[in-house]
Image: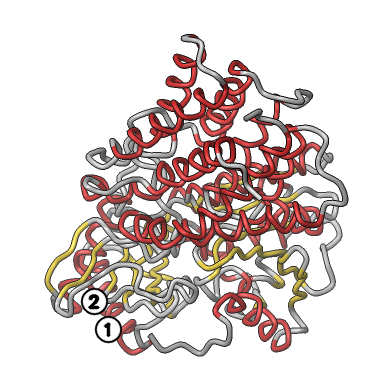
């Protein structure tokens, strides 16, 4: 394994040091405990938006801190959720009095730590709500699993809820909008290779040269099944079919199509996936009216991609289009 | 040997030492059905516990004080699911606070508190391939041992033996809670990392009670 590291234990903090230096106009990095907030602090009158999760998914979440999106992001160790003592000050700092919405990816660790933190801030009188993102169709949502994981669809939740907060919606309304995105967004991913957590030093799972893993999450965990390598169009077909069927997409509907890279797949291949995904959606009579292609929710250097589809209406479209100014997303 | 404050401190220091030895095993188990960080996360947590204990100006007055210190330290340093789970376990176990020395029924109360904390936070039941599959038999065995008149150390030993068997019994289970549940049937054939680290913690409790320590 070759990585650009000093002491692997310092990987997360050294990366955030650089992030803060590069984006001092947008963010401030707090170190004891560790969290990232918007430069200038909470925006008066605006509902605060806080998210967080293990490091290793950059630019998620810190890359989405800024105008029109998050007020704070709380990074844990690589692929490990942050702890309540980090989440609490991030939430309190994001509260201008209008309350705070925590956007939580549905992983047991994230849920438990955010749940604990929310109990603590509520005990201090902060009005806080949370929304669980669970867009990964690879996992059956049943009594027999921890429920669907939150993956690339998180970007859409953070962007759209951020725009709702920016236009002045109250906490109840922002939470409702975020819930509408969660209800209408689905993702499915594929890995061509595993990834290596810096302080672990070996790949998170073993995958043969000619194998791919369908239905992976974003923490380097294995997926649902393993198949021989196939063509880009065939793989894209599996992802799009799973997402479209789960969303029960019908002809005439409008969607955002988001092809997300897992960190080690070039942009050019992501567009190969996008091309076929778009064709397949259009063949179903679905209109792709908004698009996003790039590495936004990664698993370190994992090769692979995910396809995310968000069913749009006029309001969600307008909120997606609203101005955003963060390190990783801006228009 | 009496189970007093000095024992509780030794228990935590022994746990830290044993986690160092078990780190690679825990990480490997977690790599198979989770995300490969359990050993690293617990090691970070218990090293932080040792640092807190080293930094104390005086020995904690009560067993509950030691357990509370462990609880808050694990909650703020481990992360993942195991941080809140073990943190809440030690917080509830701390309800034995006020006792200078544990008798057999207090050992049972401590273990029951830990299990209650874990199930309150994680909402797992036995058979779901989680640390509950080690804690539940440990508590059951502790109750039985105390009822049959075992000494406090004997109660701990019974709990450890049952936890070891419980952890081994997770191998053929399908995970239905936590990250391993994403694997469905593919989680069969692997021992649960959380149940395994539970055994390490209980082994340290017995070691601290049977060996003189420093």
Question: Residue, x 41% and y 60% (percent of image)?
Answer: B27
Q: Is residue A319 left or right of residue B188?
A: right
- Where disc 1 sits, the SS reads helix
Q: Is residue B7 left or right of residue A241?
A: right
- Tell me the number on the disc at residue A272: 1
Question: What residue did someone put label 2 on?
Answer: A276
Percent from the top left, x then y, of residue B157?
47, 29
Which sits in the foreground, A16 or A244? A16
Percent from the top left, x then y, of residue B8?
67, 38
Question: Residue, x 26% and y 69% (percent of image)?
Answer: A282
Which sits in the foreground, A225 or A165? A225
Chain of the residue under label 1: A
Residue B114: image quadrant is top right
Dividing the image into 4 quarters, which one contains the N terminus of chain A? bottom left
- Is residue A16 depicted above or below B190 in this figure? below
Dividing the image into 4 quarters, which one contains the C terminus of chain A? bottom right
- Tell me the number on the disc at residue B147: none
Residue A9: image quadrant is bottom right
């Amino acid at each position: 394994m070759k990585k650009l590291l000093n002491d692997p234990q310092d990987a997360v903090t050294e990366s955030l040091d650089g992030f803060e230096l590069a984006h001092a106009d947008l963010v401030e990095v707090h170190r004891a405990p560790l969290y990232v907030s918007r430069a200038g602090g909470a925006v008066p009158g605006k509902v605060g938006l806080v998210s967080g999760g293990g490091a290793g998914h950059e630019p998620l979440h810190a890359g989405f801190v800024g105008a029109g999106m998050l007020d704070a992001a709380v990074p844990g160790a690589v692929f490990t959720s942050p702890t309540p003592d980090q989440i609490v000050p991030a939430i309190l700092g994001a509260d201008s009095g209008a309350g705070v919405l925590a956007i939580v990816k549905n992983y047991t660790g994230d849920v438990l730590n955010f749940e604990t933190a929310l109990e603590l801030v509520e005990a201090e009188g902060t009005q806080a709500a949370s929304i669980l993102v669970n867009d990964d169709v690879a996992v059956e949502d049943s009594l027999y699993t921890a429920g669907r994981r939150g993956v690339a669809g998180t970007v859409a939740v953070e962007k759209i809820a951020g725009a709702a907060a920016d236009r002045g919606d109250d906490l109840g309304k922002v939470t409702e909008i975020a819930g509408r995105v969660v209800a209408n967004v689905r993702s499915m991913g594929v890995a061509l290779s595993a990834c290596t957590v810096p302080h672990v030093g070996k790949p998170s799972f073993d995958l043969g040269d000619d194998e791919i893993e369908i239905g992976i999450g974003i923490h380097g965990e294995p997926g649902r099944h393993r198949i021989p390598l196939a063509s880009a169009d065939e793989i894209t077909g599996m992802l799009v079919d799973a997402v479209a069927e789960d969303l029960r997409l019908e002809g005439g509907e409008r969607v955002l199509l988001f092809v997300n890279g897992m960190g080690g797949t070039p942009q050019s291949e992501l567009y190969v996936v996008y091309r076929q995904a778009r064709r397949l959606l259009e063949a179903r009579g679905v209109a792709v009216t908004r698009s996003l292609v790039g590495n936004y929710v990664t698993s370190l250097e994992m090769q692979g991609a995910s396809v995310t589809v968000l069913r749009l209406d006029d309001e969600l479209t307008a909120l997606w289009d609203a101005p955003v100014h963060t390190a990783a997303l801006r228009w | 040997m009496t189970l007093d404050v000095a024992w509780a401190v030794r228990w935590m220091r022994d746990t830290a030492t044993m986690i160092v030895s078990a780190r690679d095993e825990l990480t490997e188990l977690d790599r198979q059905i989770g995300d490969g960080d359990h050993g690293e996360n617990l090691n970070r947590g218990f090293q932080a516990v040792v640092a807190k204990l080293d930094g104390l100006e005086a020995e904690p007055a009560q067993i509950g004080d030691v357990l509370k210190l462990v609880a808050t330290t694990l909650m703020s340093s481990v992360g993942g699911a195991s941080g809140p789970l073990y943190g809440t376990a030690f917080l509830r176990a701390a309800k034995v606070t006020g006792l200078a020395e544990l008798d057999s029924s207090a050992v049972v109360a401590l273990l029951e508190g830990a299990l209650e904390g874990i199930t309150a936070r994680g909402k797992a039941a036995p058979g779901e391939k989680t640390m509950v599959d080690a804690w539940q038999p440990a508590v059951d065995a502790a109750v039985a041992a105390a009822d049959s008149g075992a000494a406090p150390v004997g109660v701990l030993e019974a709990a450890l033996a049952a936890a070891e068997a419980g952890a081994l019994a997770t191998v053929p289970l399908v995970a239905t809670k936590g990250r391993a549940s994403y694997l469905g049937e593919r989680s069969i054939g692997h021992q649960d990392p959380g149940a395994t680290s539970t055994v390490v913690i209980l082994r340290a409790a017995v070691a601290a009670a049977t060996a003189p320590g420093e």
